[in-house]
Image (cartoon, rainbow, N blue to C red):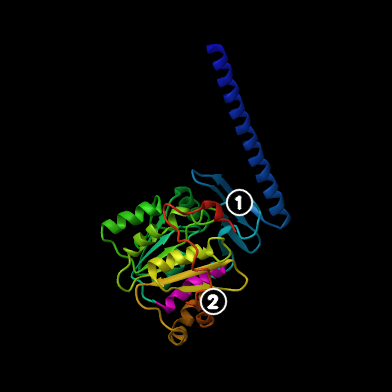
């Protein structure tokens, strides 16, 4: 009897080892295939590693350097990019849509950014507000190292990084009574937002960090199957918000404020005053008020996301 059980255990271990070997071979083959595909498009890998949480890859072509967290060559998987000749100019429309939040609140004294990526948003806000404190919550210390080495990210007396889970960090900050004028949610794991950073309970913890004139900004996808549920969740916690979408991109930016949102006339009137400051990033802020809508264009009957209900299988496009 004992011999039979030992035989079964050995077969199970052998099968597990075989499956592991197959997965390793497939992963290597996928990396080689992805490199070949990118090479055909004039893109080369300049760094690659597997961290505790994800694949981290840095690619470069003749125009830009990019950070990605997937090894496939599908479009839209770059997490952060910068132009080699114009590093200040913003590559992604979502970053420009994010800056349109300055039409709601234009003097943040303290900013929290969830998700570092290549450091694009922290660099941009630091240039705009050199005296503002910027705190970044990033779960992966490898991302911090890669951003520093390949994207010129630097911690300073005004810019600091807390390495750890943002949910834990925000919870602790709330218990300590810390406040941030602007909280930017920009955490992605390669496919979509980590599900524990999408729920009603999490957003309520974020809300506790906001002073009476505070604002939250979230980078999400307009093509996600959770679009309606996500929208209902933000509306449940923050009430009316600006839904910012731009043609030609799958991103959308949510801007919610503790104060009543300005109307279209006010947004338009504020734009010229900051237009010149934002031109260095390759954008014309006067074009953005028309993109900032509070209209509800989704199914309001969709169930809100909670810690008990956040279906990860729906996160993909």
Q: Quadrant of the N terminus?
A: top right
Q: Of the two numbered discs 2 and 1 on the same chain, state the one appearing first in sequence.
A: 1
Q: Is residue 246 magenta?
A: no
Image location (x, y in percent) of residue 30:
67, 45
Does residue 191 appear anywhere in the picture? no
Instruction: Tell me how many marks there are.
Output: 2
Q: Which residue is mark 1?
A: 46
Does residue 177 appear anywhere in the picture? yes
Image location (x, y in percent) of residue 104:
41, 78
> Which span is picked out in magenta?
91-104
In the displayed structure image, the side of residue 44 where residue 108 appears, left or right: left
Q: Residue at x 52, y 79 (%)?
A: 288
Q: Residue at x 53, y 70 (%)?
A: 298
Task: Please tell me how crowded label 1 is: few (under 14), some (14-19), or many (20+) other residues with Cα within 10 Å.
Answer: few
As drawn, the label of residue 264 is: none
Q: Which residue is mark 2?
A: 283
Task: Please tell me how crowded label 2 is: few (under 14), some (14-19), or many (20+) other residues with Cα within 10 Å.
Answer: many
Q: Residue at x 52, y 12 (%)?
A: 2
């Amino acid at each position: 009897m004992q011999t039979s059980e030992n035989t079964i255990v050995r077969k199970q271990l052998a099968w597990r080892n075989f499956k592991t070997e197959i997965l390793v071979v497939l992963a290597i083959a996928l990396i080689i295939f992805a490199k070949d595909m990118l090479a055909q498009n004039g893109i080369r890998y300049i760094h690659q590693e597997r961290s505790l949480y994800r694949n981290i890859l840095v690619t470069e072509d003749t125009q830009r350097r990019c950070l990605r967290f997937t090894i496939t060559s599908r479009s839209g998987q770059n997490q952060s990019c910068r132009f080699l000749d114009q590093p200040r100019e913003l590559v992604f429309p979502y970053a420009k849509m994010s800056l349109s939040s300055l039409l709601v609140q234009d003097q943040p004294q303290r900013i929290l950014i969830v998700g570092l990526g290549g450091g694009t948003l922290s660099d941009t806000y630091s240039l705009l507000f050199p005296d503002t404190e910027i705190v970044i919550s990033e779960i992966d210390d490898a991302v911090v190292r890669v951003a520093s080495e390949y994207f010129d990210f630097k911690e300073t007396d005004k810019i600091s990084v807390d390495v750890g889970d943002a949910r834990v960090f925000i919870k602790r900050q709330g218990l300590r009574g810390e406040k941030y004028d602007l909280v930017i949610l920009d955490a992605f794991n390669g496919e979509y937002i980590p599900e524990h950073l999408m729920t009603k309970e999490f957003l309520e913890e974020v809300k506790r960090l906001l002073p009476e004139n505070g604002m939250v900004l979230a980078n999400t996808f307009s093509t996600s199957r959770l679009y309606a549920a996500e929208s209902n969740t933000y509306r449940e916690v923050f009430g009316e918000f600006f839904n910012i979408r731009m043609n030609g991109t799958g991103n959308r930016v949510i801007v919610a404020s503790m104060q009543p949102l300005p109307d279209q006339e006010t947004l338009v009137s504020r734009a010229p005053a900051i237009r010149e400051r934002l031109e260095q990033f390759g954008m014309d802020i006067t074009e953005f008020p028309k993109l900032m809508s509070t209209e509800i264009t989704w199914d309001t009957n969709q169930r809100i996301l909670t810690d008990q209900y956040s279906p990860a299988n729906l996160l993909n496009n």
